[in-house]
Amino acid sequence: MIEFRDVEKVYSNGVKALSNASFTIQNGEFVFFVGESGAGKSTIIKLLLKEIEPTSGDIIVGGQSLSDMKRSEIPYYRRGLGVVFQDFRLLSDRNIYDNVAFAMEIVEAPRKEIRRKVPMLLGMVGLSSKAKCYPNELSGGEQQRVALARALVNNPSILIADEPSGNLDPATAEEIMEIIEMANRRGTTVIMATHAKDIVDSMEKRVITLKNGVIVRDEEKGGYFNEA
Amino acid sequence: MKLRTWKSFFKQGFKNAFGNKTMSVASIVAIAAALCVLGVVMLIVLNLNYLMDDLEAKSEVTVFLDKDVSYSDIKAIESKMEKWDGVREVEFVSKSSALAKWREELDDKAYLLDGYDGDKNPLPHSFIIGIEKPEYTEDIASKAKLLPQVMKVNYSKEVAESIGKVVHSVRLVGAAVVIILAIIAAIIIHNTVRLTVYSRRREINIMKYIGATDWYIRWPFIIEGFTIGITGSLIAIAIITPLYQYVLNKLAGQHLAEGFFVNIFRLLPLGDVIYNILFVFILVGVSVGVIGSGMSIRKHLKV
């Protein structure tokens, strides 16, 4: 379970990115965060990753308050999260297989386990035949699928996606969404920030709409509202 | 951490150290140069210490007594001097043994002293006081001068004092030079590793998001610094060792030519200094490398 309690974030330059944000996300839920650029979506994601600290309020993930978390505990917390970004963030000096295996090497998974799971995940995202390719030899959609395989390979309980389809054409975006939905069906909580209206409208999931750092709507089976 | 993880740290560290050639070479040269200067300073200090020890063993004060000194006075003076601080031993040299010694020194011209035996011996009785440390020399000499029946006191004041001062200042200047050089070398390594860190900041960022610990990210960079440091040390050793051997050979040749200097100016043999130098070089090289790289990664871990 993820809980935001009256979370406020004011950046050091004085910009108020988020005010009085309160919401609860149950395990296994699929939630969209929508809103224009600067509405506060990325701030929520950064707060969840504990990349930044809230100015006030509390964030509780899996029963643990993020503000009580020690710096040394952050890596272990993040291992329970899978993250994909708009710009994929693959390691350009390693092939696809190694990019996915890397996430398992960091947590020092047994070698046998790595050899079993990496091909499995590459199969799941439909890239088994490109395991030896390097990221720059792949299309944007393929790169994002690699990023998804990497995010899911350690069986995270929460998948965080920051504009995963932002750089992709609609058809490719749909493929990505299928993989994300598949992960959700297997029990992974999905939190996705986006401004892709089509995707949000077609998925019929919970939608939290942000405007100027304030939550203006929180609807089950919601849609994308341009004028919230 | 697992052995496999360490293996990958070393692989990555070596790849960084030898991959970015220009910067690594600059760092290695800087460390090697700094260590060479350090080596020269060390060799000078070690040899001066050696020379000091040698002189300490040889420090002595000669006390000449009045001609009419009696046997009981001699005994009294001897027991007094034996109680002074810094006195290692007191040796009595009678006038006849002094004459015999002089004869010996004159060698084939000893006949010059014929006829000065017995009552005609012009030499005084004397004491040779062995001193523990050169610092005591002056004190003991001035005390000896105040004793009754003492005619004259001789000691090698200048040599002992000036060498003591030289060693002291060489040590001070040497320490300062070494510290400054170590800092400069650390800054240069810091810059090299900072460049690798900068070029890999994206990767570090990704690793942080996936949940890599700080140490997981840090180790390859520390190994990079270590590799640069140890390579610099080994190069410095490869330069300093034959250089010292050359100086030794050169001096040995000179000794043969002017046999006189053999005992005064003897340098430590290579075998006696090589381990000291090896130890210090590797210690300094490695710590400078590790500290330099450790510092440059710190900033990028705050994600």
Image: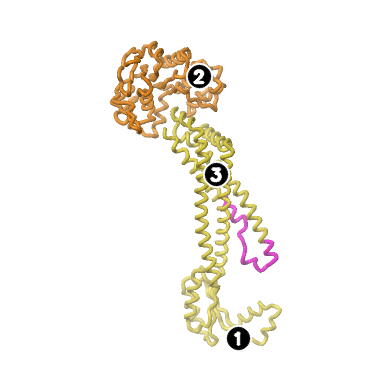
Chain colours: A orange, B yellow
From the image, tell me which residue sits under label 2.
Answer: A140
Quarter holding residue A54 = top left
The percent coordinates of residue A20 (x first, y second) are 28, 25
- In terms of secondary structure, where does tag 1 sit? loop
Q: Do marks 2 and 3 both belong to one polypeptide chain?
A: no
Q: Do marks 3 and 1 both belong to one polypeptide chain?
A: yes
From the image, tell me which residue sits under label 3.
Answer: B229
Q: Is residue A164 left or right of residue B286?
A: left
Neighbours of disc 2 within 10 Å: few (<14), some (14-19), many (20+)? many
- Say which amino acid is labelled 3: Gly
**Residue at position x 55%, y 77% in the image:** B154
Mark 3 vs 1, N-terminal side: 1
Neighbours of disc 1 within 10 Å: few (<14), some (14-19), many (20+)? few
- When the figure is inspected, residue B209 is found, relative to residue A34, above or below; the finding is below
Residue nearer the viewer, B218 or B134:
B218
From the image, tell me which residue sits under label 1.
Answer: B122
The percent coordinates of residue B219 (x first, y second) are 49, 37
CB of mark 2 within 8 Å of CB of mark 3?
A: no
**Residue at position x 31%, y 31% in the image:** A55
Residue nearer the viewer, B22 or B246:
B22
Write down the chain letter for disc 3: B
Write down the chain letter for disc 2: A
Image: magenta residue range: B252-278
Q: Was residue A82 drawn as part of the magenta stretch in this picture?
A: no
- When the figure is inspected, residue B236 is found, relative to residue B132, above or below; the finding is above
CB of mark 3 within 8 Å of CB of mark 1?
A: no
Write down the chain letter for disc 1: B
